[in-house]
Every structure is written in structure tokens, then in C-alpha cells.
Amino acid sequence: MASAESLGSASDTRSLGEQRELEAMREAQRGEPPRVAQSAQGRSWVAASVKDAAIAGFITAALGLFFLGLTTDGPSGPLGIHTRWGALAIAVAIVFGVRLLLNLFLFKNPNPASTAFSGIGLPAAAISGISKTLGMALLVVALVLPFLLIQFVPGQSRLYIDLAILILTYVMLGWGLNIVVGLAGLLDLGYVAFYAVGAYSFALIAQNFGLGFWLCLPLAGILAAFWGVILGFPVLRLRGDYLAIVTLAFGEIIRVVILNWYDFTNGPNGISGIPKPTFFGLEFSRGEDGVAAFFGLEYSNIHRFVWLYYIILGLALLTNFVTIRLRRLPIGRAWEALREDEIACRSLGINTTNTKLTAFAIGAMFGGFAGSFFATRQGFISPESFTFIESAIILAIVVLGGLGSQIGVVLAAIVMIGGTEALRNLQDVALLQTIFGANFDPVQYRMLIFGLVMVVIMVWKPRGLVSSRTPSAVLKEKKRIGADLVAQGEGH
Amino acid sequence: MSTAGPARWDIDPVLTVEHLTMRFGGLVAVGDLSFNVGRGDITALIGPNGAGKTTVFNCVTGFYKPTEGRIAMRQGEVGDETIGRLTASGRQWIAEDGGAVFLLERMPDHEIAYRAKVARTFQNIRLFGGMTLLENLLVAQHNVLMSASNFTIGGILSLPGYRRARRAATDKAVYWLERIGLLDRADDPAADLPYGAQRRLEIARAMCTEPRLLCLDEPAAGLNARESAELNELLQFIRAEHDTSVFLIEHDMGVVMQISDHIIVLDYGVRISDGSAKTVRNDPKVIAAYLGVEDEEVEAVEERLQELEARA
């Protein structure tokens, strides 16, 4: 009824013939749901698009009047106001143009262009096959990557191996956090605390007791797991937002304690001179007892980077292997059941306290491993490396990758870490500079682009890049489970 | 009221609830309730909406801690004297040759399911929707598999003991899936099932914990006539083939009257009737509670009730 009335008022402005036609349509559709309004909308969608774009342009003009149109001179000279109407006009034109295009092809178009893409979605079985093949391919590439880099980009191989090490560190952290957030469904915003505990455990043990990397690594993992349990206890009863806030606070507490406990942690000055990992007792040095001399190679500092690369690759693969194994064991299944429904778990005799604590402890342990690797790679650690933004990045990797998906974490880490670093090191900016002007520096926009990519992924794939769940036990046929059926757990 | 000596459920009870009281602030949800659930029986707890049925269930399964009262779960032959001794000892449970007693009001919910072997389902179905049917039934066997995997270490190494336990668990899951007619859908997510099948799966999942007492909270809610009949059949099967007593809350009188050996009627948290289906059906208190009575009739009914009680 409402649509018919609005149609009546709108029809006053139409020509007589058009009104007759509408009358006929209304007659023909009596008793039908009122579809007339839709077809009328369809006819004028171009005009509506232009109008909408014009409104958007006007809003931009109003908002940008002071931000873009006027500019003041800096504090060095006398204060003065200049106008930049050209910049404002460009901004308005961009908003108008983009909005118009979006309206024409997506929002107002009766056949949005997005429907053309919706059919592209692959069947579940194909995705399963692809992710397996992709996983194997990525593993093979990862295993030979340093040699490929040395072979093909000899000048910059160190840079790229370093970047690969960084990405792998985040892959490992993502896999570790995935146990807590993706499998057990407990949103942990303070994961960096365990990273810090691992790094500082290694640094302090190595400095005070003179132990090497390989002995400290398990110790750091155990200590981080211990702190995982300590965090686990107070948050056992918390749900939803409260869980997120307490874990966030825990991350900050650890950082602030490290910052202020000067006698123990050397406070903001950090700890330097952390030993490098040895190659089965051999050091990567120029001397007689170095690795290069032992193998009869010419000394090059790239050897140490290659070795670091393989250490983190090994650690990351260990994390992956353990996670995949645990998922198929009762404990992993209990984690996932906990994410689905905690009360049902209790009714089946599952001790949810222990289950949550093991998830926190094992997730924290891998965080601790990654932390001690970070310490040995950098040789220097300070509280500044363990701020909340690290937790946020790791969580973003897990969420963008798809909660609970191992391969998704890898893809997200490559996109997020590799992407931002690639923007930082962008060599060939001539093309971009011809578009955006000679002063354009992509490095300054990398966080903006990074944010846009995140928004795009979340609009396009709201449940992450790999948004389906693989069953942990199969009777006859493995079918992937769509993300819409899988619960997200607490705090999402 | 009964004339032919003590009833069967009073002679050989599996669950004994005594003076159970549950208060939420000033509200008495359940007041001084006592009843027995007989071994091997199907016992129904019925009553109008808000009578406190689910509260009783939550107390029995440990989701609420009762304000007062004793809830004793017996496995095997155990006398009242043992329960008294256990109560005085302050322990949660006691196992002797021939049986064990568990004081449920002292135990946490997961221990009740694990040790006392009381399983339950929920009024609003609580399946693990994103997990397959098989996974749902494997999660229910968590404790068995967990100890078989030596708390995960044996599982990671895939020791033969764990592999055997895993196969046995899968076999049991398959057995129940076959029983509830969902074997073809074993690898589908549970949330994809139609409502009636979800109800059956939830019962099967509870049965995978090998319970001695199965508590079902409105198992027939939302089922059509055919599905109700299937449910009846499933419950009869569970009673006949497994060492499991069934204790259920139900509004569907067709189901209740057909399959129950023993019915307890609750109204405003108080037991108003207790007996076989026939006794309960003809009890004027029950009729009054369900159908309601006119104001002027209340006194007449109450007088009649007092007469009846005096006679009994």
C-alpha cells in the first residue's frame, strides 16, 4: 500500500502517457505484490545515481572546505591563510566520479556487476584440493627460497631473505594464536605478551647463565606456556568483550613491567648482545672455527641469514604440524567443541577449565618460541618491540586468513607483512608518480593502502580468505563446512 | 495413595532427590521436592510452564547448585545406609564393591557427566553446529579417548592403544548414527540437519557418554507426529538395550502417557502428584493445575483434596 501511495505522488510529475501506462500496470498487477515501484525505480536508476553522486560530492565539498580548501602557514613564519580551491575541486571530482561509478555498476544498477562475480565461487571440493596443492607448493617454495633468492637476485638477496624471515615469524605467531582464537575461540588481544616473555626469557637466560640458543629455546617456550596458564586462570569465566579486554590488559601489563623493572630487564634500554644461534656448535664468523671455514666456503654474512631462515621455517612447520595433529586428537576436537558450545561441552563431561588452559598454554608456548627466535635474530630487544600493535597485527593475520585455517594464515601473513614491506621498499615509482605527481612517495601511504586492503578483504570475504572448516574426522567423504555454520567463539 | 505396597521406583531407585530447594533471590523455583527415579524406568517430569522442571534438571546435572537438599545417584546395588555415610563424610562420591554413590549437589557439572554418568540434552538444542555428526559423537567420547591417548602424548605419537580406542569410538559413533537413521549424513555439519534429526542426534550424542541416567529436556518439542513416534521408539530402545534409565521433561502428553512408567507432576516448584500414568491422569490436583479451576470451585476442590489425603 505504501508503495502505491508514493507512486501516486510521484506520478504527478510524469507525462500523461506514462501515467496511463502505470495505471495499466497497476491494473494488471492487482492482487500481486506491488512490483510497480521496483520497475519505476529501474527506469530512473541512472538519474538517481547522478543525484546520489552529486550529494556525495556536495558533502565532500562541505567537509573539505576547511580541511582542503584552506591552509595555514606553519609556525616558522608569520601566520597566514592560503586557499587551495584546486585541491578541493579534485577531491570533490574524485568522490563524485567514484560514487557515480559505484552507483552505476553496483548500488543502483538493477543487475549489479557483483552478481557476475558471485558465480565464480568454487565448489567446496575444489577449494579443498586447491588449498592442499597450494600448501604443498608453498612448502616447496619455502624450502628452496634462500637459494632461489641468492641465485636470481644476488644483489638484494639479504634483504629478501630478511623479509622472508620476518614473514615466517608472523606466520608462526599467527599459527600459534590460531590455536587460541581460531580453534578454541577465545579472543586473545594480548598475544604479544607471550612473544615478549619468550624473547626476554631467552635474552636473560643467555646473558645471566651463558646458555646457547638451542638450550634456551625450549626453556623460553616452557616459560611462555607457564604465563599462558597464569593468564588463563583469571579469564576462565570471562566471555565476550570482557575476555578481550582482560587479555589486552595482560599484554600491556607484561610490557609495562618489562619497561619499569629496570634492575631485571634493563628497562627501556633493552638488552643487547644476545647470542646468535650456532650451526651445531659452529659460529657464523670469519675466523678459523667458523661455519664457512669448516665447510671450505668463502665467508659471507648471508650464511647466517640462510641459517636463521631455516630455523624459523623449522619452528613454523613444527607449529603447523603440532596444530594439525592436535586438531585430530581429542584435545583439539574439544577446543573446537568449546568454540561451538561451552555448555554442551560441560554436559558431555569435558573439563572446560583444563581445555581452555591447554589452549592458552600451547598457543603461548609457540609465541614464546617465536619470541626467542626474534631475540636471537635481532640481537637486541627492548619493550618497544612488544606494543599492542604487534598483537593487533597477529590477530589481523589470523582473522584475515580465516579463523582456524592454517593456509589462510600463511596467505594473510604474506599479504600483510610482505605487502607493507614491499610498499616500503618500492623501487619503481615512476608510474605512480606520473599519476599522483612528482612528489608522490608510496612509503607514506603504505598504512593507508594496508588499511584499504584489510577493508576490501573483509567486505569481499567477511570470514577470512579461507572461510571453510575441514572436519577433523571423516567417515566416508571429506566435505568442507561453510563458515556460516561454524561458530566464532567468545569475544568476536 | 498407592495401596499395593511401595512402588518399584522406591525399591530400586537410580536417582534419589530429597528435599531439593532452589531459590533465586526471593523466588523459590523448587521447594522441598523429593522423588525417586527407578532403575530401568522411563520417568517423566511434567507440569505447567514455569513449574520449575528445568530447574530440577539443572540441579541434577550440576548446572545449578541447589540451595538445599540431597541428590544421590546410585550405580549398582547401594543401600541408603551408604548414602548416609557418604553424606556425613563430606566426600563427593564413594565406590564400593557392587556399586557407587555420587552426591550430585557436591559435584561440578562435567564430573557429573564423567563420573556419575548422568547425561543430558537441552530444551534449545545445543549441538556443535559447525562440526560433523561424526565429530559431535566423538567429542562426546572425549574422556575415554583422552585417557587412551595418554593425555595427548600417545595421540601425537599415534601409539597402538590410542589407535584402538579411536577405532572403537568411531564404531560406537557409527552404531548410534545407524540407530538414529543418520549414517548417510555422518560427514555433514550438524547445523545442516532438520530439526527432528538434530533432536535425535543430541540424544545419540548424550548416549555416547554411556550414561546410567539420561536426562532429556523436552525431547519432543517441535517434532511432528511421525518424529514423535520415532522418538518414542528410540527411547524404548535405549531402555531395552542399554543399562540406561531415562528421565525426561515433556509437554507432549501423547509421548508422556505412552512411554512413561512413572510420572512426577510439578506445579509452582512443588510436587503435586507422583505415580504411574494412570494414577496421575486421574489425579484431581493435576487436572486442576493443567486445566485451571474457577475461583468458586477452588475451595470445593481443596476440600475434596483434603478428604482424599485424609483417606490415603
Image: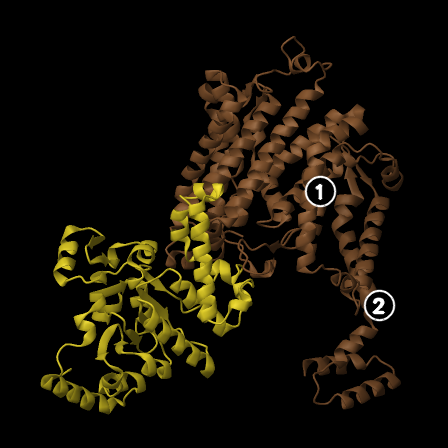
Chain colours: A brown, B yellow
Is A255 placed above or below A210 here? below
Residue at position x 15%, y 82% in the image: B2
Q: Nearer the viewer, residue B19 or A102?
A: B19
Residue at position x 34%, y 70% in the image: B241
* Left or right: A28, with A373 as reference point: right
- Asked if one can make out residue B55 in the rendered structure from this viewpoint, the answer is yes
Within-10-Å neighbours for mark 2: few <14, some 14–19, many 20+:
some
Residue at position x 83%, y 72% in the image: A44
* Left or right: A311, with B298 as reference point: right
Q: Quadrant of residue B29?
A: bottom left
- Which label was assigned to residue A46? 2
Residue at position x 37%, y 55% in the image: A349
- Which label was assigned to residue A137? 1
Percent position of residue A363, x then y: 50, 40
Is B265 placed above or below A275 here? below
Is A11 placed above or below B33 here? below
Percent position of residue B240, x then y: 33, 73
- Asked if one can make out residue A415 in the rendered structure from this viewpoint, the answer is no
Q: Quadrant of residue B112?
A: bottom left
Percent position of residue B280, x then y: 25, 83
Which chain is indicated by disc 2?
A: A
**Which type of secondary structure does the marked residue at label 1 adopt?**
helix
